[in-house]
Structure formats: structure tokens, C-alpha cells
Image (tube, rainbow, N blue to C red):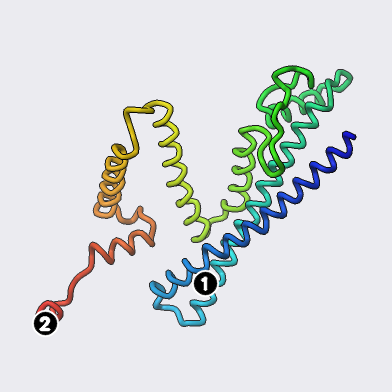
Amino acid sequence: AKVIIMTLSLSEELHAIAAALVGGARYGFKIRLPHAMVMIWLFRRDLSSKQKMTTVGRMVVEHSTNLAAFAALYKTVLATLKLASRSLHEGGPQSDVGIFQSLGRILISLLVDGRLIKSSNHPANQVHFRPPPGHPERSHHALVAGAIGGYLVWGRYSGVNYQIVLYLTSRVLVGLGKHLQERAFPKRLQFHTSYPLFAAAVWGLVMMLFEERPDVLHPSLKKSMDEIYRYKIQQSRIAS
């Protein structure tokens, strides 16, 4: 019965990995194609029509394949950690192992469960809730899987990867800010009162950097700001 349960669990995890692979590729294609078409056709006037199509295709393929690879790798690491965690708990204590095996078991236990494994029947080590396939068994599993996927997939610098990482950075900071606000200031600091201060700080800092240190801004941001704040109306237009 145990073998049947483990086999069924493994097949379900493989299905979740395949679904993530397809979902990542599909969403990357859907979200990048219209964005790349608009941006390339509007701002890359130095390229020919053929070069624009090639650039759009390259960006779409890179975005979709990276999302698919990350999603599949993330689910794979989650499944590995989940199966390792259940194997540790269901394997029972082992007393006749060598020192190196014991040390390896301790390190694996710390990585998988975040604590030392004393016994599979220890109350602290019992898994009362078993998440569905594709979901983390422990809260820190998502952090480990995301970090591994982030390093291997998004760690290679490119314009597409960097844009996605910057996008996530802003979303993560906002999410952490909301989390801290709910824990530390649940009633004193609400969104409708904190947002104007947040907007003022962001726009004040970006304008200061633009005027004082434009070289540290991202080229696309600097180019956009140049078109707005360094735009010069021709004298002929003024005269007419």
C-alpha cells in the first residue's frame, strides 16, 4: 500500500510539473507578444520590418521558454523536497548508520524540514496537512525552489530577464510593505494614507536621480524621461 501511495504521489507531481511547463510557455507567449509588438514598432525605428519581426520573435521565445523552464524547475524542486520530507518521516529512526551517514541525514533534515529529525513518531515531526500536488510541503520549500529556479533560469542577464526581475522586485517590496504594515501598524497606517507618501518618495527619488545621476538609471527609463523632460519644441513650430 505504501508503494502504491508513493507511486500515485509521484505521478501526480509529474502531472503538476508538466502542467506548469505548459502554463509557463503559454502565459509567456500571451503576455510578451503584444508588449513586444507595440514597443518594438513604436520605439525601434532604426530597425527594418524584418529585423523588428525577428526581434519580437526572439523576445517572445525567450520569455515563454524561461517561464516554462522556471515553472517546471520550481515544481520539480518542490516535489523533490516533498518526497524527501515524507521519506524522512516514514522511514523511521536509524541507529546502525555511520557518522557520515548520520551527518548527511542531519543536513538533509535541516534543508527539508528546517529542524532535526528525532523520530518519525515525534509530535513536532508529524505532517498533519498534506498539500495537493505541486504545492510546497513546508513554508520554506517555496523559498528554496524559487531561489534555485531564479539562479538557474533568471540569473542569466538579458533585457527580458532583467525587466522581469525588476518587475518582481517592485511587487515583492510592495507585498513585504503590506505584510509589515498589517503586523506592526494594523490600524494606524492604512493604504489610502500611506500611498500618497509612497508615490511622493518614489517620484522624488527618481527625479533626483534623473537630474543628478542619470547614468545610474536603466537606459529605457532614461530614454523615456529624456523624451519628456528634455524635449525641445522647434522654433519653427512656435512661430507658426
Q: Quadrant of residue 189?
A: top left
Is residue 38 rendered to the left or right of residue 109? left
Label annotation for residue 12: none
Q: Amino acid at mark 2?
A: Ser
The numbered dot on residue 56 is 1
Q: Quadrant of the N terminus?
A: top right
Q: Residue at x 9, y 80 (%)?
A: 239
16 up-or-down from 193: above or below: below
Camera-side residue of 165 and 183? 183
Spatial CA distance of label 1 from label 2 is 40 Å
Q: Nearer the viewer, residue 194 or 239?
A: 194
Disc on res. 240? 2
Picture layout, residue 92 above or below residue 145: above
Reading the chain from its start, which is encountered first: label 1 or label 2? 1
Is the C terminus in the top left, top right, bottom left or bottom right quadrant?
bottom left
Residue 8 lies, in percent from the top left, at: 83, 43
The kind of residue on which mark 1 rests is: Val
> Closer to the camera, 9 or 203?
9
- Secondary structure, mark 2, is loop
Proximity of marks 1 and 2: CB atoms separated by less than 8 Å: no
- Percent of width and height locating residue 138: 65, 32
Residue plotted at (46% across, 82% down): 48
Q: Secondary structure at mark 1?
A: helix
Q: Residue 217, position in %: x, y?
A: 35, 54
> What residue sits 31% from the left and 40% below the top?
192
In the displayed structure, does residue 42 sit left or right of residue 71?
left
Q: Within the image, what quadrant is residue 228 found in?
A: bottom left
